[in-house]
Image: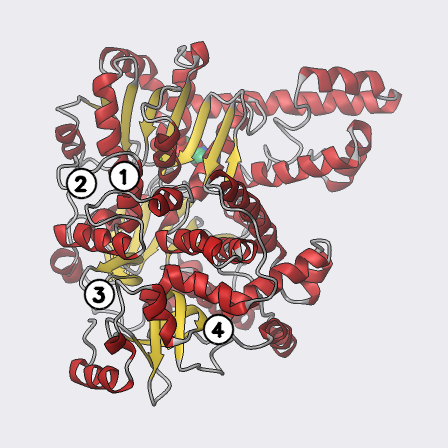
Amino acid sequence: DDPDDAPRDGKKRSNFSEQEAWEEQQIRKSRLHFGSNDGGRAAGDGYGLVFDTAVDFVKSVVQAGDGEMDELAEAIDTKVALHRELQDERKNLPVYQLKDDLLKAIEEYQVLIIVGETGSGKTTQIPQYLHEAGYTAKGKKIACTQPRRVAAMSVAARVAQEMGVKLGHEVGYSIRFEDCTSEKTVIKYMTDGMLLREFLGEPDLASYSVVIVDEAHERTLSTDILFGLVKDIVRFRPDVKLLISSATLNAEKFSDFFDEAPIFKIPGRRYKVDILYTKAPEANYIKAAVGTILQLHLTEPAGDILLFLTGQEEIETVEETLKEAMRGLASKMPELVICPIYANLPTELQAKIFEPAPEGARKVVLATNIAETSLTIDGIKYVIDPGFCKMKSYNPRTGMESLLRAPISKASADQRAGRSGRTGPGKCYRLFTEFNFRNDLDDDTVPEIQRSNLANVVLRLKALGINDLVNFDFMDPPASESLLKALEELFALGALNRRGELTKTGRRMAEFPLDPMLSKAIVASEKYRCSEEVVTIAAMLSAGNAVFYRPKDKQVHADTAKQAFHVGDVGDHVALLNVYNAWKESGYSPQWCRENFVQSRTMKRARDVRDQLEALLERVEIDPCSGAGDLTAIRKAFTAGYFRNAARRQKDGSYRAVKSHQMVFVHPSSGMAQVLPPWVVYHELVETTKEYMRQVTELKPEWLVEIAPHYYQHKDIDEHETKKMAKGKGRAAM
Ligand code: CDP
Ligand code: MG
């Protein structure tokens, strides 16, 4: 009898509790489900969800009818069996052999660098060992940071399952806009950015007995800042333990930085991986990847495939192409199960990548970098690596940050290859030449701090009282040009004064877990008396890019529905506001979402985010007030944050950034793509084939001088001058 069987599930529901509790459980269940990678088996109504507490258990027994008792007993058996199985799995992980040595080392040294292959059990096991060893006594917690939200959620779910507790109780996670922890929580997985925020409220992290900076090799911006801050904390808190855990062998650098901290190595279990290169460079790696998958599927023995792509768009293209090809070959080929995974994929669908393919079928996982070290998928035997990823890049001269497709490093390529040799010998197909590998790839990825806009970090550090940024203890310091640019930017936003000190505006901005430009728009909404609207739009912008969807067979309907939110045609920001308000008026109805081709998941998230932003408004003492349809006020508030992102239309329909003269275009998905107003302000740039502005709103040029006089002078918006400069400089921005 399959415990995941749906009808049984329905029966059980009536035994236990009210509709509301049931729904809540379902939500948690889908989370858990996603977190489990043993085929969903342990997720569903298996372990951890039969009863949340002993009281629930007793209640159920008391309430159960005769026939139901058997069912209960069965459910408990399943639960116990799964628990045993999970405990056996835990003991099979490489780190288990070293448990005692590891705990001894942690006891002896305050700072320890831990190195071990991906999948050896660092993330899921070490916090549990520490918990068992008493580090969570006296009300102290263990923090474990992850560079990615998805990883924090999924790992927390897994550990809750292993410990047999409800997610959010003893084990929880905290990511931006979502806090799944409680009073009880002792093991807390969190994004590195969230721990950074915790410093604001608790500068010595007094509630933690252990801080684990996990996946340190990823060297995200937040991780790098954390390094400097936690290094400082261990000096004045002898009781705290600091663990830096990394998947790469390049640990000396961490050790050097942390005053020669000892390195603890977890020997990997890694099988031989054959690396195959292409003979000549591939002109189109998407095509090459699809070809490789099909060929491999036809000729190679059983084993799943993992293909690394750079983002959702590529993943969808490959998925389509593969499906097409399989339709044509259906009778001649065994089944191929296609599983995409990227950060914005709905949680329910993410679970699919962990489910084993049915007998005789082969699974192919199409993943972003997320599968390089953060997520471990069992059963992968073949890796296909085109050698690219999306990477943030920053041009301090123009102040422009963009996500670009870039070649990966040698270290990344080796990580990726290693994903095929976890459970047996594997093969890695590199879609580039051996010459490319040796001569063109960098050894290591440049740390994010050296290719980012630092305005956010500088604001955060200033809010922590760290004024002397030049002497901050960076593992790899950012270019001084970038630091300077960040200071200038914050000055122009009014967050810093001429002496580089935080202003009241800056202090308020730092409270919001948002980009400084968006925080500034919110703070400015006080002046323009439209905080309600601006907070709604900010929430919509933060909830994700997927507000609308466009099914292939209903594109015209979808476009019409979307256009309806663009009344007045002033821009995408106001359209987002219209969407939210209409949804709110419908009573937050999912039905309404379907009818309007709006993603109900994004909307729910926007509502959550909005609630939190509203609470923060109160905290910084901005009264909620509505501009009652004054679209100029709303647009001025955004301009107060985004004035740097102002662009002016050219004769050919392209735009030029007002200050940098960079050539940019309205993204085709924008409601402004047909309108092309003479002056616009945009939310962000995305680069695909061109530099596209996403979320575009019409602007009056005189606002720039009025709102940002530090930044714009009349000559910047003057007809004649602008033309002359644009002509003279060409593509000056690059
Ligand atoms: O951190 P590290 O890469 O060393 O390993 P881990 O993330 O602790 O993973 C240890 C094992 O737990 C792996 O074999 C995974 O298959 C399993 N795991 C899982 O089943 N579900 C998760 N969400 C995370 C890990
Ligand atoms: Mg890990």
- Of 548 and 328, which appears nearest the observer? 548
Residue 437, how many percent across, how many down? 17, 57
For marks 2 and 1, give the CA distance.
8 Å
According to the picture, the residue beneath numbered tag 3 turns out to be 398
Location of residue 443 with respect to 468 vertically, above or below: below
Of labels 2 and 4, the one closer to you: 2
Secondary structure under the numbered disc 1 in the rendered image: helix
Secondary structure under the numbered disc 4 in the rendered image: loop
Instruction: Specify whether residue 367 is in view.
Output: no
Residue 18, how many percent across, how many down? 79, 32
The numbered disc on residue 469 is 2
According to the picture, the residue beneath numbered tag 4 turns out to be 670
Disc 2 to disc 1: CB gap under 8 Å:
yes
For marks 1 and 4, give the CA distance.
35 Å
Is the C terminus in the top left, top right, bottom left or bottom right quadrant? bottom left
Q: Which residue lies at the image location 57% right of the left edge and 36% below the top edge?
A: 32
Question: In the rendered structure, which amino acid carries the disc numbered 4?
Answer: Ser
Q: Which residue lies at the image location 50% right of the left edge and 69% below the top edge?
A: 632
